Image (cartoon, rainbow, N blue to C red):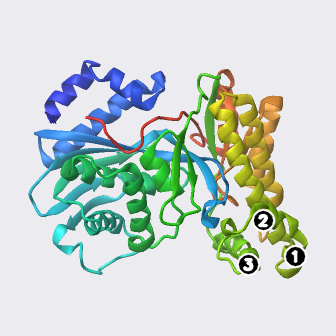
């Protein structure tokens, strides 16, 4: 391992420029990332002193296709992005994990307390404890370390900042104490357990898996305890497009009933076949029985089942065209997915607050600006939050300025897909 001083000198002399470009993809980000790394090293030294350190990174993620399919154990496409959680780390035989995280403050987890049931839901300390305790329960080693952690994964913008945080902790424990032998898939599963059980937030596995594995991945959740994960080529940049995410600044307060209704209605439809989730039922069988679903559950449930089935099929079609390098067909599929979310899934605005339609406005504004080259859809849970758009690179800066003029500076971010999930940078 290299000392803080040596790493600072290498960054100042651009000796790590190629390494950063490989990770963050965008040449325009290298100056920003260099300054960010230098700042993190400075802050680590302030908190813990000079000496040998390792640097770890875990990316945020974006949902590419498969809107509200994961909780029915369906299929999704998700990708890691070039914004990440960054950690400067040093092992220390102190019997504790001691870290300072920007945004969360000091977090100290005694390794002697991993086996107790003292869990505080909603507490960042519980996330760290949950990852370490779950890794230990799975038969791996855990040990003490000190770290400074910073993140530019936007909180509340649907890019999974918490999953990236869980992933970086799991990756640190894998490399420092297990020779990197804990697979990215297992680290993703560990992160979900930490968030569900220790942090107290119900979530599917898509977020953690995309952050941990990296690149564009297809996840088939049909087998509950053994999800199938496959990397898929995503030649977006070479085709001349980039991904833009716009946070519409809508409040998620009071939206729990809207999110819950999607799951409840899909599960109510599955119950007509005495099944728990829709993936346990043949897709053609579901589509042949739309009348049964609308009569026995309700009309919206029937629409949401149609969305689930067709969205799974869109995921599979998207994989086929991406493997052949056909970005044009992929973008058309993305528009179909967005149309289905709007009309069938109906997660664009809350039925209880029909005058609040930030996502609807963002989609309409995207169409006004991008015209026939508009490929935009809701991103993530919906009702409030973010949209994503695939924008030609020569239009991206203008599109960002236009969307910022509506939703405020910093609302729209131009992202690229990085190939690495949780990783040891140096």
Element on which disc 1 rests: helix
Q: Which residue is mark 2?
A: 305
Q: Position of residue 216 (x, y in %)?
A: 54, 40
Q: Are marks 2 and 1 in contact (CB under 8 Å)?
A: no
Q: How many marks?
A: 3
287 and 374: which is toward the camera: 287
Rendered position, 195 above or below 275: above
Whole-number angstrom distance, CA of label 2 to CA of label 3: 10 Å
Q: Residue at x 20, y 30 (%)?
A: 7
Q: Which residue is mark 1?
A: 292
Frontmost of labels 3 and 1 is 1
Q: Which residue is mark 3?
A: 268
Mark earlier in primary sequence (2, 1): 1
Q: Residue at x 42, y 38 (%)?
A: 420
Rendered position, 254 above or below 42: below
Mark earlier in primary sequence (2, 3): 3
Residue 267 placement: quadrant: bottom right
Whole-number angstrom distance, CA of label 2 to CA of label 1: 12 Å
Element on which disc 2 rests: helix
Residue 384 placement: quadrant: bottom right
Mark earlier in primary sequence (3, 1): 3
């Amino acid at each position: 391992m290299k000392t803080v001083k040596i790493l600072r000198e290498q960054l100042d002399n651009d000796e790590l420029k190629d390494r950063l470009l490989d990770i963050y993809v965008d040449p325009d980000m290298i100056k920003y990332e260099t300054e960010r790394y230098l700042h993190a090293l400075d802050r680590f030294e302030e908190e813990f002193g000079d000496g040998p350190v390792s640097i770890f990174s875990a990316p945020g993620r974006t949902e590419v296709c498969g809107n509200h399919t994961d909780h029915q154990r369906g299929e999704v496409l998700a990708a890691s992005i070039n914004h990440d959680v960054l950690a400067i780390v040093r092992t220390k035989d102190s019997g504790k994990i001691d870290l300072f995280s920007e945004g969360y403050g000091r977090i100290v987890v005694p390794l002697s307390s991993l086996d107790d049931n003292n869990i505080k839901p909603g507490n960042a300390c519980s996330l760290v404890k949950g990852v370490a305790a779950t890794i230990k329960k799975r038969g791996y080693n855990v040990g003490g370390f000190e770290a400074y952690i910073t993140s530019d994964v936007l909180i509340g913008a649907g890019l999974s900042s918490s999953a990236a945080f869980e992933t970086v902790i799991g990756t640190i424990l894998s490399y420092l104490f297990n020779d990197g032998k804990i697979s990215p898939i297992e680290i993703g599963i560990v992160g979900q357990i930490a968030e569900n059980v220790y942090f107290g937030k119900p979530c599917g596995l898509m977020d953690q898996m995309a952050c941990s594995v990296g690149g564009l991945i297809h996840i088939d959740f049909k087998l509950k305890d053994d999800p199938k994960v496959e990397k898929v080529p995503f030649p977006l940049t070479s085709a001349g497009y980039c991904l833009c995410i716009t946070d519409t600044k809508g409040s998620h307060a009071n939206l729990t009933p809207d999110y819950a209704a999607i799951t409840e209605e899909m599960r109510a439809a599955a119950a007509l076949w005495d099944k728990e989730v829709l993936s346990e039922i043949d897709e053609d069988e579901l589509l042949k029985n739309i009348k049964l679903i609308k009569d026995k559950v309700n009309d919206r449930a029937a629409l949401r089942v149609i969305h689930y089935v067709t969205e799974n099929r869109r995921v599979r079609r998207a994989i086929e065209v991406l493997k052949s390098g056909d970005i044009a067909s992929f973008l058309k599929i993305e528009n179909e997915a967005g149309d289905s979310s709007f009309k069938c899934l109906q997660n664009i605005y809350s039925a209880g607050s029909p005058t609040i339609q930030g996502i609807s406005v963002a989609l309409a504004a995207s169409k006004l600006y991008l015209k026939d080259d508009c490929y935009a859809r809701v991103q993530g849970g919906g009702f409030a939050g973010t949209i994503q758009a695939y924008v030609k690179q020569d239009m991206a800066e203008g599109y960002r300025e236009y969307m910022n003029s509506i939703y405020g500076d910093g609302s729209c971010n131009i992202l690229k897909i990085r190939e690495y999930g949780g990783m040891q940078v140096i």
